[in-house]
Image (cartoon, rainbow, N blue to C red):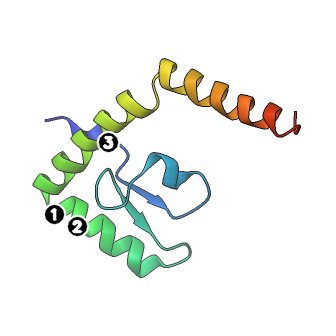
Amino acid sequence: VGSEMCIRDRSNIYGINDAVVDGKTGLLHTVKDSADLASKLNRLVTDECLRDTLGQAARTRIHTQFNQNAMIKHFMTFHTQMIAKGQL
């Protein structure tokens, strides 16, 4: 099904949680925990169904949440709120 292009595993660091929903669109591992990383990678290597499911969900999330229109709307809302608060 071609899930090789999708985000499958990223460390649990700032910003990644916006793109990856742990267990739904990818797998997050604990920072500096090589055993946790190895465990998550092993799950992905051995479970084709999991890879395909995460990959499909990731593609759907990226196309709906991070497309050009969604990002413009997000930035406009953010800046409107900042202006209303007098912070811009």
On the image, which quarter does residue 83 sit in? top right
- The foreground one among 77 and 43 is 77
Q: Amino acid at mark 3?
A: Ala
Mark 2 falls on what kind of element? helix
Pointer 2 and pointer 1: residues touching (CB < 8 Å)? yes
Q: CA distance from mark 1 to mark 3?
A: 19 Å
Task: Give the number of the mark in front: 1 or 3.
Answer: 3
x and y, in percent, of residue 74 in the image:
58, 30
**Can you identify the residue that label 1 sits on?**
46
- Pointer 2: residues within 10 angstroms few (<14), some, or many (20+)? some
Quarter of the figure with residue 85 = top right
* Type of amino acid under label 1: Thr
Measuring from the top left, give residue 43's x and y in whole percent: 23, 67
Labels 3 and 2: the sequence-earlier one: 2
- Residue where numbered disc 2 is placed: 43
Instruction: Specify few, some or many for label 3: CA neighbours under 10 Å numbering under 14, 14-19, or 20 or more.
Output: many
Residue 53 vertical position relative to residue 41 in the rendered view, above or below: above
Specify few, some or many for label 1: CA neighbours under 10 Å numbering under 14, 14-19, or 20 or more: few
Residue at x-position 72% and y-position 29%? 80
| For residue 8, side relative to residue 16 (left or right) | left
- Furthest toward the top, the residue is 69
Q: Earlier in the sequence, mark 1 or mark 3?
A: 1
Q: Position of residue 77 (x, y in %)?
A: 64, 30
The residue located at (40%, 71%) in the rendering is 37
Quadrant of the snapshot with the C terminus: top right
**Within the image, what quadrant is residue 9 found in?**
bottom left
- Residue bearing mark 3: 58
Quadrant where the N terminus lies?
top left
Count of numbered tags: 3
Q: What residue sits 26% from the left and 68% below the top?
A: 42
Mark 1 residue element:
helix
Disc 2 to disc 1, C-alpha distance: 5 Å
